[in-house]
Image (tube, grey):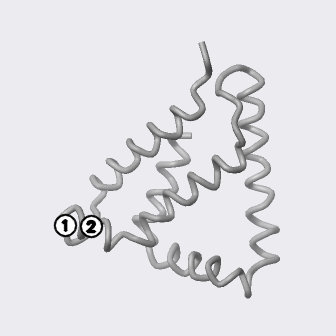
Amino acid sequence: MRQYIRAKLRYALEHPHGAKVFTKEVVAGLPRYRAVFAQRVGPVLQAEVRTFERWAQEGRIARINFTHLMFVIWSITQAYADQEAQFALLLGRPTLTAKGYGQAEEVICHMVLAAVKPSP
């Protein structure tokens, strides 16, 4: 999970304009790429959920709604592309740096891993 979150944040850092274009399409209701989105993202989401389900069956993580967990991860990491200027301003910086993204990664991972921590 940590590697996935790191990769999503790295994409936001390295490709902020692409991430913002994606968000505009989603916010507009996917008028141009609905079918492409369903064909490409749907199977990836299903595969990730199956992996989480297997981990839950093995007792490695707690069972929660893994589809919604993925939505949360996507939303949080996407915010760092969409709202980078706001976040940088509120942190008193001209832009978010790799260090800032690293700090975000630590917080996001802490929250996500706490949510799926198996009961003793």
Q: Residue furthest bottom?
A: 32
SS for callout 2:
helix
The answer to whether 68 appears left or right of 111 in the picture is: right
| Residues under numbered marks 1 and 2 in contact, where contact means CB atoms less than 8 Å apart | yes
Tell me the tag on residue 33: none
Q: Name which residue type carries label 1.
A: Arg
Judging depth in this view, the residue of 114 and 48 nearest the camera is 114
**In which quadrant of the rendered view does residue 16 lie?**
bottom left
First reached walking from the N terminus: tag 1 or tag 2: 2
Judging depth in this view, the residue of 65 and 57 nearest the camera is 65
Which residue is identified by label 1? Answer: 93
Crowding at dot 2, Cα within 10 Å, few <14 / some 14-19 / many 20+, comes out as some
Tell me if residue 35 comes above or below residue 59 in the rendering: below
- The residue lying at 82 percent from left, 77 percent from top is 35
Name the spot of residue 4 as percent of width and height, x first: 55, 47
Name the spot of residue 81 as percent of width and height, x first: 44, 69
Crowding at dot 1, Cα within 10 Å, few <14 / some 14-19 / many 20+, comes out as few
The answer to whether 117 appears left or right of 54 in the picture is: left
The answer to whether 76 appears left or right of 43 in the picture is: left
Which residue is identified by label 2? Answer: 88
Q: Name which residue type carries label 2.
A: Ala
Judging depth in this view, the residue of 108 and 2 nearest the camera is 108
Q: Quadrant of the C terminus?
A: top right
